[in-house]
Image: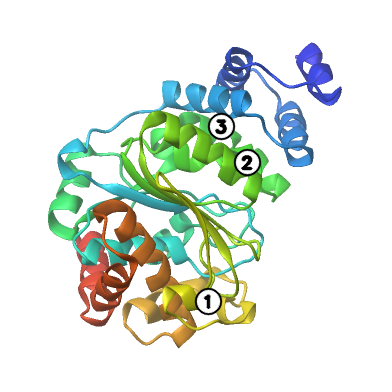
Amino acid sequence: MKALLAHLFSHKTLPRPEARQMLLHMAEGAFTDAQMAAVMAVYIMRTITVDELMGFRDALLELCHPIDLSNYDAMDVCGTGGDGKDTFNISTLVAFVVAGAGQAVAKHGNYGVSSISGSSTVMEHLGYRFTASTDHLRKSLDAANICFLHAPLFNPAMKTVAPVRKALGMKTFFNQLGPMVNPASPRKQMVGVFNLELLRLYGYLYQAEGKQYALLHDLGGYDELSLTGMAKVLTPAGEQLVSPESLGLPRYQPQDLATDGTVKGAARIFMAVLDNKATPAQRDVVCANAALALQCAQGLPYPHALAAAKESLASGRAKTSFTKLLNL
């Protein structure tokens, strides 16, 4: 263990097999909390390599309890988190808007670590009970067109490192891995990432795997379209810079997306959006991201996808998906 830490702290990287083995050892409890914190600190201070990212992902997928939802052609919509913006739960709301628009969703999520309210945090606060039951999750998709996959139930490694991540209170390489280890292995996915380097790494991996994807990074530092400025979007067709105006939407200010710093406040915005009583900024940001997800999954032109997202919200179908999911 000391040799491994010395290797990492001397600015050396790990080949893919060694990265895999290290994470397997962490999951098995072979590291103390202090040693796990030291490893995480390395990747806070430097960029992860492609080989390391692939090795860590290999380990998590090896440990993961997979679930077969292939009959539903469900997509995932998620962000890495770690952007430090403390916005409301945009990607989780996007999942319900997309489900309401007719695209099945297998939403992968976890508690907030570097933010107040992660997707699991707000869902639990609003009354959702996490489950790993395949029958229940399939019933959720049948009834609500969406299911929620709480990461620690499917990947024991996430649970093992959770206390250390929480104590650090910062984004770690586990943020980078989260979207890659959805236990349903969806072929369609929209992922927001917290920096351009990670966007490049995700693009390399997803293109090699033949996924149907939309990857994005907002140049204001967000892991989602914020409509506060330019964003880079990467798809199998290439990459492009988009502005709020090019998406047919207004430009907003960062404070328009902020919460009051509490889970209760984030949940209040969450329900206001679903009730179609949110501010124009909150509504438009959710619809902008949902449209990108629908464009990714269904190949719709963006203006048509945006209209479908707005209709899902305005008609109440997005809230119906949410209500049905909670009431199963």
Q: Which residue type carries mark 2?
A: Pro
Residue at 62% over, 19% down: 19
SS label for mark 2: helix
Q: Which residue type carries mark 3?
A: Thr
Marks 2 and 1, how far apart at CA: 24 Å
Tell me which numbered mark, 1 or 3, is placed earlier along the sequence: 3
Residue at 43% over, 29% down: 208
What is the quadrant of residue 53 in the picture? top right
Quadrant location, the N terminus: top right
Marks 3 and 2, how far apart at CA: 7 Å
The residue under label 2 is 163
Relative to 133, 116 lies left or right: right
Tell me which numbered mark, 2 or 1, is placed earlier along the sequence: 2
The residue under label 3 is 160
Q: Which mark is residue 239?
A: none
SS label for mark 1: helix
Percent position of residue 70, x then y:
20, 36
Front residue (pair 256, 40) = 256
Front residue (pair 308, 20) = 308
Q: Is 78 above or below relative to 264?
A: above
